[in-house]
Amino acid sequence: MIAEHIAIEAIDVLLVDVPAIRPHRLSVATMNCQTLVLVCVRCSDGVVGMGEGTTIGGLAYGEESPESIKVNIETYFAPLLKGMNAARPGAVMAKLRGLYQGNRFAKCAVETALFDAQAQRMGVPLSELFGGRITDTVEVAWTLASGDTGRDIDEAEDMLARRRHRVFKLKIGSRAVKDDVAHVVAIKHALGDRGEVRVDVNQAWTESDAIWAAKRFSDAGVGLIEQPIAAASHAGIKRLTELALVPIMADEALRWPADASALARERCADVFAVKIAQSGGLLGAASVAAIAQAADIDLYGGTMLEGAIGTIASAHLFSTFGELKWGTELFGPLLLTEDILTEPLRYENFALYLPHGPGLGVTLDWDRIDRMRRNRTRGASIAMN
Ligand code: MUC
Ligand code: MG
């Protein structure tokens, strides 16, 4: 029991630019580098919590950019949070949510840091604050997004041979639909039953494009279609789900738990991609999962291509879900050329292994972070305990 008032003393936000191992092409952007948005919350008991609010493609994916996340936390969140009781993360976040609109990624970063600090204080892994983990590993899919069919097949073969991934998500939607379909079908034919192939269109198609492609994907054995049309079109995604050609997953359509509720009420999708940043934090993502489970909608553990902090925070939460039928795509750190941990996350046998230490259970490599962080000459160096 933590009865005393533990003050939030300081909140630091760092933008850390890490090159990608290869260009990562989505319909909304091509990423050559990922900007990690790391938040550290220092508390008066000496505990430091870490969180992450990373997004994709600057301002291309959502309404927040790495820069807006940093500015809004520093300008609006930090003055409010300073002095508040770090031992009451739920109360702190309720206040923050009540005062400030939107900013889901920024809220996620702060909330993760508060819960990391609280779990460290209590001496338990983060997963134990969210009902307790049911599993120590989560299966991890890999995204093929080089844009080149031959290169994607080689990449998938390499992942299969190394037993790192056997589920492959193909990023499509930036080319003509028939070209995308040919690309996906060629990869599925090459892998056969050895690899599962899914696609993510990131809202790029019209409904008629999606119907045309779904028929061909169904014949080819593609396993899942993620967010094929605009997030706002609940009626459209419901019609695609009802066609029952290939299971349909909602991703960008799930901005808040209220969206999950609306989509679940009408059973607009077969699967929900649960993402901590997209849901405004761990609590919001837990609500999205609960809504899905109550409505008999399957769960998938999504990513915003976060680095190690957002990835392991997500894994802690996902490990508490009763059933994660479609696994996860928590591969973000593997897409980056440099690790920010002293000991990398453990990926083996197609899965990510959860750590057992208190809080997030990982240790940051501050020398590396300091080398890659933006404006390092102007900012004060972040020295951790
Ligand atoms: C998304 O839309 O799902 C997940 C994997 C990837 O390559 O991009 C992300 C975002
Ligand atoms: Mg997606």
Image: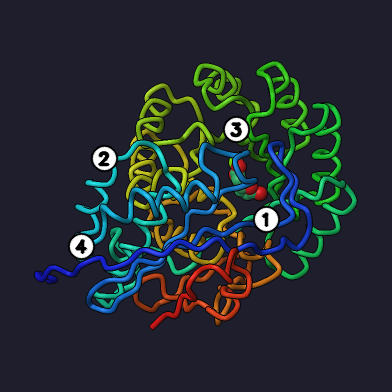
Question: Of the residues tagged 4 and 3, which is closer to the observer?
Answer: 4
- The residue carrying mark 2 is 99
Q: Amino acid at mark 2?
A: Leu
Q: Earlier in the sequence, mark 4 or mark 2?
A: 4
Report whether the residue tagged 2 is closer than 8 Å to ligand 1: no
- In the picture, the disc for residue 83 is 4
Quarter containing the C terminus: bottom left
Near-viewer residue (18 or 202): 18
Near-viewer residue (77 or 62): 77
- The residue carrying mark 3 is 227
Q: Position of residue 97 (x, y in %)?
A: 29, 42
- The residue carrying mark 1 is 142
Q: Amino acid at mark 1?
A: Trp
Assess disc 2: are there few (<14), some (14-19) or many (≥20) residues with their C-alpha within 10 Å of its C-alpha: few
Q: Earlier in the sequence, mark 1 or mark 2?
A: 2
Question: Of the residues tagged 3 and 2, which is closer to the observer?
Answer: 2
Which residue shows up at 43% across the image and 27% down it? 263
Assess disc 1: are there few (<14), some (14-19) or many (≥20) residues with their C-alpha within 10 Å of its C-alpha: many
| Circle 3 SS class | loop
Q: Amino acid at mark 4?
A: Gly
Q: Quadrant of residue 126?
A: bottom left
Q: Is residue 122 left or right of residue 165?
A: left
Q: Is residue 323 above or below residue 272?
A: below
